[in-house]
Amino acid sequence: MLRRLHALPGVALALGLSVVALTGAALSIEPALNRLAAPGIVQGVSVAALADAVAARHQRVEVIRQRADGAITVAFADGDVNGVERVDPATGAGLGPYKVSETSRFLTNLHRSFLAGDVGRAVAGIGALAMLVLAISGVAMLARRLGGASDRSRMVDSVAVVAEQAARRAAGR
């Protein structure tokens, strides 16, 4: 009975975990791919010269920053218009508005909330709690299979024995 209660939700949770793992992997390599496409910072270019070139085009410059993906961006205010633009680090010329790609936004929303907003975030949280319950039930089934679980001390001892055997096998490799 415990095996069925463990296996059926495990299949459903494995699908959710797969989505989260695959989108997380894609999101983790995205900055590296974007860095390859961003113009590099040339040695010998002064930050002050870059700031002067940017200040010549905008009334008020809030911040100049290098993002994780390598892009140099400028947050500015021109009267009533606020914006963020990408900047060529060698010349200070504007390269257009900075926008997060639709692919990145889609992957982030899929990863965080299964494209369902706050409801999806709640589902992800409930899924994480359900995985914790599955892990605990898995330990209980393992302990029972090893001959324990009739009392708590034997169950803890069984889990400790399994952990110790796994450590010995890992050390022996």
Image (cartoon, rainbow, N blue to C red):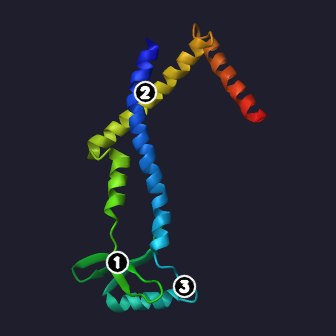
Q: Which numbered disc covers residue 85? A: 1
Which residue bears the numbered disc 2? 10
Dot 1 crowding, Cα within 10 Å, few <14, some 14–19, many 20+: some
User: At 45% across and 61% down in the image, what residue appears?
Assistant: 30
Dot 3 crowding, Cα within 10 Å, few <14, some 14–19, many 20+: few
The answer to whether residue 70 is visible is no
Q: Position of residue 14 (x, y in %)?
A: 43, 33
Q: Which numbered disc covers residue 137? A: none
Which residue bears the numbered disc 3? 42
Which residue extends farthest right? 172
Q: Secondary structure at mark 3?
A: loop
Q: Secondary structure at mark 2?
A: helix
Q: Position of residue 46 (x, y in %)?
A: 53, 89
Q: Amino acid at mark 1?
A: Glu
**Which of the 4 quarters of the picture holds residue 84?**
bottom left
Mark 2 against mark 1, which lies toward the viewer? Answer: 2
Dot 2 crowding, Cα within 10 Å, few <14, some 14–19, many 20+: some
90 left or right of 99?
right
Q: Is residue 73 above or below residue 142?
A: below
Mark 3 against mark 1, which lies toward the viewer? Answer: 3
User: At 45% across and 14% down in the image, what residue appears?
Assistant: 2
Q: Position of residue 4 (x, y in %)?
A: 42, 16
Quadrant including the C terminus: top right
Judging depth in this view, the residue of 20 and 148 nearest the camera is 20
